[in-house]
Structures are given as C-alpha cells and as structure tokens.
RNA sequence: GCGCCCGUAGCUCAGCUGGAUAGAGCAGCGGACUUCUAAUCCGCAGGUCGAAGGUUCGAAUCCUUCCGGGCGUGCCA
C-alpha cells in the first residue's frame, strides 16, 4: 500500500520537529503558487512552540534534513524561502506513486472505509403532494442525493429519506376544494397534479377572502386525521398520482430513496412524541395550544415551538419532532442531515433544541440550508417547473450534438442529449455552495460551455476517445502494458497528477462540510488541468514509452472524472 | 423591533481549520483545428475583497459596530 505524498512528507519532517506525524500532516499545505515547490510547510505556527523565528526554523529544517532528503526517493529537495519550507518532489517518483495508488484502487479511487459502522440519515427532496415539482425542489433533491453518494463512498451506511409533504392543513384545503368543485375526470387527464394544484390555489385564495373556507379546510383536515374514510380515500388517491409523477423526475435525475416516509408516516408516532415531551416536562399549555417554551428550559434565544394547535390538530413541527425521535430510536445515526431551504432555519433550530431537551444527541443533527430561488411561488403560480427546465436543456443538447461532426451514433443521440441536458442542470446547482439565494436564470441553467456539467462530460468523452484511438492504432490498453509513469515529468503532467492525488481529500472534505460543491470544484480543476495537458502534449503520437505512460495517466483521469460525476449524479459519457 | 443568512472583477462564483503577489468561468478583445472531439485551449484586460475600527508577526478569512440585500419571527409547511 502506498501512502499519500502528504504522509510521506510528514514522516520525513516529523522527527526533526519533534511532533507527531499526524500533526505535521495537517500543517503541510499546497502552495498557492506554482514554482515555489510542490508542497510547503509554513513555519509560523511552529515559531512559538520552538521559540525560534519562523525563518530560522525553515532554514534549519532545510539544512538538518538534507541527509534524510538525500536518501528519500520522493522528496528531491527542501528549500527555505523566508518563513516557508518549500518541498520539491522528485517528479518521477511522485508520478509512479500517484498512478500506483489510483491503479490499486481501481474504479474506487477516492473511496474509503472511514465511515464504516456509522449510520447517516439524510432527509432530502421532500416535495409536497399535489404540487408540481418546480426548480426550487431541484436543490434539495440533487444536493441530498449527492450527499448520500458521498457518504456511501466513505463507507457510511446511509438511509436516504424522502420526507414527503403529504400531511397537514394543505390537505384540508384540497379535500374541501375537491368537495366543492372537484371534477373526477380531470384526475385522468394530462396533468392531474396541475389540476390539484389549481384546486389548492383556488381554495387558498378563497380562504384569504372568506374565513369560512379556512374553517372548512381545518375541519376537512380534522376529518382526515380522524380517519374519515372518504377523506382518506381522496388523500390516498392524490398521493399516488403525485408519487407517480415524482418518480418520473427522480428516474430522470437518477435519484433513489431508501425510505419514502412522508409526514403521514409519522401520524401514529406523534402521540409517542407528545407523551415523551410530557414525561420530560418540557411542553405546556399556552392559549389552548401545546408549546415548548425553550427559555423555561435554559435554551436562550429561541422562540417557542408549537406542537399542537388550540383545536387539537397537529402541526408540521409535531411530525418533524416525531420523525426525529423515530430516527434516533430506530437508527441510532451518527448524523442526521436535513437538506431543507434556509427559510426553515428557525424551525430546525427549534426541532434540534427540542430533541436535545428530550435527551437525544441533537449535536448530530445538521441543517444543510440552501437559499431559495427568487421570484417563484407555488401559490402565485409563478413557479418554473423542473420539467420545463430539463426539457429545454435536453432539447438544446440534442441540437448541439447534431451540429458539426456528429460523433454520437443515431440510436444513442436521444439518451446522450438527456444525459447532457440533465448534467447541465444538475451541475449548475451543485457547483456552488448552496446557501446563497439564486435568481432563476434560463441562460445559466442550460449552458454547456465553461464550468459546466457538459464540460466535464466532454472531457470524459475525449479521454475515452484517446483510449480508443491508442487501442486501435497500437493495440495498447491501460494496465496491460509495461508502462513507467516515471516519464510523466512535465509541468502539465505534474499538475494533473497533483489533482488526481487530491481527489480523496476532496470527497472527505465534501462529507465533512456537507458541501457537494467541493467535489464539483475539484473535478473542474482536474478537467482543466487535463485539458491544458491535452492541448500541449500528445498521447497517441508520442514515443512508445511515453505513450504507454500517458495512457495510464489518461485512464486515471478518466476514472476519477467518471467516479466524481457519479457522486454528483451526472452520467459520464463515452461520446458526445 | 428582534434573530439568522448573504455582500470578493461588468455578471455568476472559488478562496479549506487566518499564511507567500486574491483565483476561475461567462461577457469583452486578440490568438490556436492537414495531428487523440474547438462543448476545447492560450493570451490581454478587468478587484480600495460592502465600510470603519480591533485582534495578530500576518486578515477576504476571526471579533465589534455600521451600511445594503434576503429570509424568519405562536396556532402554514
């Protein structure tokens, strides 16, 4: 097993510093600027501990370690540059080690077992029944799905949960609306969800003008909660219709769940939750409703959480609390991750605080908050449907494929266009940190140039093309020749190798920070480094020894790109 | 009012637990396809990192205040 470059460097430096290797590993960094070395050790943090100026530490290290360096195959030379110790690697040894590690890991380079034995529950997507899937839902869906895959890659046992919005007063509105205006035949028509949504909007609007509609809605929801057969049947029907529609979109996005446990799933678990609150004495009556007043229990700065309305009906918060308790009791997870919009931050803080008061390890709960998509509202009917966006992207992708040299066989154009269109939309979301609000922008979502999903897919297709051409002309395939990666010593090759080596760290950081964008950014850097290499150097026409070495490099990049795209939920294409 | 989030190039964003001269993409300008896919690459231009203080050997990064924008704030989800 080859250790990482960082560990090798730490092993070399640690004795001279009198520090444990693990600590030194954390101090070693990548210099911002090339030409200053491959790695660097800033000596500032050591200055106080060693009671010497950082410049002196750097200089002394460079000198005292000279004999060790001379014997070290990987580190070629140390150079003190002011307060920094710059570490220059032997390019050939470095290249051999990196490619050996990738080859050894096979298709799974970047994965590890560091999460083995730990469970993670990820609550994501969670659309509302009877409402169409709009681009606002895309965020939770793709971020959550990526976090599921990233954690699995690190060995965690992940339970991806779709916490469907299939319960609550909104169904009171729907049931009441159906009873007043429902036209059964329209549920068989083209767009049944759209129709249900219209009914909801109409009833909601009516309720704003005339309180009697609001009363009807509340009463209808009460009936639903009490198990009224007609209300139940109607609810069940709406739920099925919606799920069928959502499934279509999930298939297109390649998203799967381990558990579809919507809010209704916790219907019979709310009593347990409320009983637990009572038992612990954290809930009390207030103005006829049941609340948790956090201030009374030593939690400052949080508004009270409402658990039961004065009319006895339960609330979203009640179901979320029941869900949280259920998850802790059922799974004993190391993390529970909620991928939910930033506007719900307060609600989740209340939820986490309540779980903490109940004695659960609330610090394991994390809210991955994303900004909302500006200028959209289901109620106002200004929402842009995910279907429209994906449809448009796929259409444009097909146009683009058919332009110029068509490299995709006719019978694969459709699925390629789908992969490119979806890749563009998915990556547009995953390439940024999610917290910022985003203004909806057609242009940006369906772009194929620059830092986009299709750019990564295109790079992958080019890598594949190189492998194919070399196989055709020379009969050589990666892993099947006597190749010496030690020949990969140009700046461009070294840059690619550096990015390859960093890939496992990117996955770890993405999991630690709950940021799929770390993986996205890394893939963009790798693809850019490779593209630069690609334009400057040749693989197929290089001298045989070099060609075989480069073939291994190409395959390594291809694997990492394919693997990373897989984590993000984007298909790696053979041709485009 | 109070709380939370955001503010980096014309636009969209990176910048890891503070570390060397703040980086990409898009848009603009100029180049590179008889050679492995030009959905690419190379170059130029573009920034008082919202403002002011503070901590530090060192601040886009940490603290305080202010400004601007967004969201939330007891019977919606």
Image (tube, coloured by chain):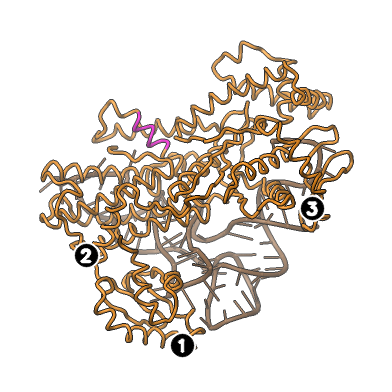
Q: Determine the main secondary structure of the stretch shown in magenta.
A: helix
Residue pointed to by mark 1? A53
> In the rendered image, which quarter contains the N terminus of chain A?
bottom left
Kind of element beneath mark 1: loop
Q: Quadrant of residue A6?
A: bottom left
Kind of element beneath mark 2: loop
Structural crowding at the residue carrying mark 2, measured as other residues with C-alpha within 10 Å and reported as few (<14), some (14–19) or many (≥20): some
Q: Is residue A416 magenta?
A: yes
- Is there CB contact under 8 Å for labels 3 and 2? no
Q: CA distance from mark 1 to mark 2?
A: 35 Å
Residue pointed to by mark 2? A489
* Image: magenta residue range: A415-422
Kind of element beneath mark 3: helix
Q: Which mark is residue A508?
A: none
Q: Quadrant of residue A526?
A: bottom left
Mark 1, chain letter? A
Front residue of A505/A128: it is A505
Q: Is residue A116 magenta?
A: no
3 or 2: tag closer to the N-terminus: 3
Q: Nearer the viewer, mark 3 or mark 2?
A: 3
Q: Which mark is residue A294?
A: 3
Question: Residue pushed farthest top?
Answer: A185
Q: CA distance from mark 3 to mark 2?
A: 62 Å
- Is there CB contact under 8 Å for labels 1 and 3? no
């Amino acid at each position: 097993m080859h250790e990482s470059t960082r560990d090798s460097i730490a092993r070399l430096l640690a004795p001279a510093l009198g520090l444990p290797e693990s600590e030194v590993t954390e101090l070693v960094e990548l210099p911002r600027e090339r030409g200053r070395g491959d790695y660097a050790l800033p000596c500032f943090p050591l200055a106080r501990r060693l009671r010497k100026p950082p410049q002196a530490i750097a200089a002394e290290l460079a000198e005292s370690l000279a004999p060790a360096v001379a014997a070290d195959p990987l580190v070629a030379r140390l150079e003190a540059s002011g307060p920094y110790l710059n570490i220059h690697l032997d390019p050939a040894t470095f290249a051999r080690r990196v490619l050996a590690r990738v080859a050894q890991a096979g298709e799974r380079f970047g994965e590890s077992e560091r999460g083995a034995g730990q469970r993670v529950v990820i609550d994501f997507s969670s659309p509302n029944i009877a409402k169409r899937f709009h681009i606002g839902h895309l965020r939770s869906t793709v971020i959550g799905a990526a976090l599921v895959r990233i954690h699995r890659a690190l060995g965690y046992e992940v339970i991806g949960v779709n916490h469907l919005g299939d319960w609550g007063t909104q169904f009171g509105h729907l049931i009441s609306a159906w009873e007043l205006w429902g036209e059964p035949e329209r549920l068989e028509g083209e767009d049944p969800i759209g129709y249900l949504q219209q009914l909801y909007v109409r009833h909601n609007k009516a309720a704003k003008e005339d309180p009697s509609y609001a009363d009807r809605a509340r009463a209808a929801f009460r009936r639903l909660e009490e198990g009224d057969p007609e209300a139940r049947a109607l609810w069940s029907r709406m739920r099925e219709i919606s799920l069928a529609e959502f499934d279509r979109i999930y298939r297109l996005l390649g998203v799967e769940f381990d558990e579809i446990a919507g809010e209704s799933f916790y219907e019979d678990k709310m009593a347990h939750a409320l009983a637990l609150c009572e038992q612990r004495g954290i809930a009390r009556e207030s103005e006829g409703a049941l609340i948790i007043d956090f201030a009374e229990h030593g939690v400052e700065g949080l508004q009270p959480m409402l658990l039961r309305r004065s009319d006895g009906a339960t609330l979203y918060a009640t179901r979320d609390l029941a869900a949280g308790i259920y998850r802790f009791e059922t799974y004993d997870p190391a993390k529970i991750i909620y991928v939910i919009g930033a506007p719900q931050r307060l609600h989740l803080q209340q939820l986490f605080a309540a779980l903490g008061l109940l004695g659960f390890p609330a610090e394991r709960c994390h809210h991955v908050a994303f900004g909302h998509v500006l200028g959209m509202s289901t109620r106002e009917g200004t929402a842009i449907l995910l279907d429209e966006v994906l449809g448009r992207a796929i259409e444009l992708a097909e146009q683009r494929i058919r332009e110029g040299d068509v490299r995709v066989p006719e019978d694969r154009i459709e699925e390629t266009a789908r992969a490119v269109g979806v890749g563009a939309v998915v990556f547009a979301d995953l390439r940024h940190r999610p917290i910022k609000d985003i203004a909806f922008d057609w242009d940006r979502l369906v772009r194929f140039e620059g830092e986009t999903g299709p750019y990564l897919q295109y790079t992958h297709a080019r890598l594949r093309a190189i492998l194919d051409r070399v196989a055709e002309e020379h009969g050589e395939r990666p892993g099947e020749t006597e190749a010496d990666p030690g020949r990969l010593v140009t700046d461009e090759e070294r840059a690619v190798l550096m990015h390859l080596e960093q890939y496992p760290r990117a996955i770890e950081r993405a999991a630690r920070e709950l940021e799929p964008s770390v993986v996205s950014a890394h893939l963009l850097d790798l693809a850019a480094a490779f593209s630069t290499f690609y334009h400057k150097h040749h693989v197929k026409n290089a001298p045989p020894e070099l060609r075989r070495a480069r073939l291994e490099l190409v395959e390594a990049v291809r694997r990492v790109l394919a693997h990373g795209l897989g984590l993000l939920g984007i298909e790696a294409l053979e041709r485009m």
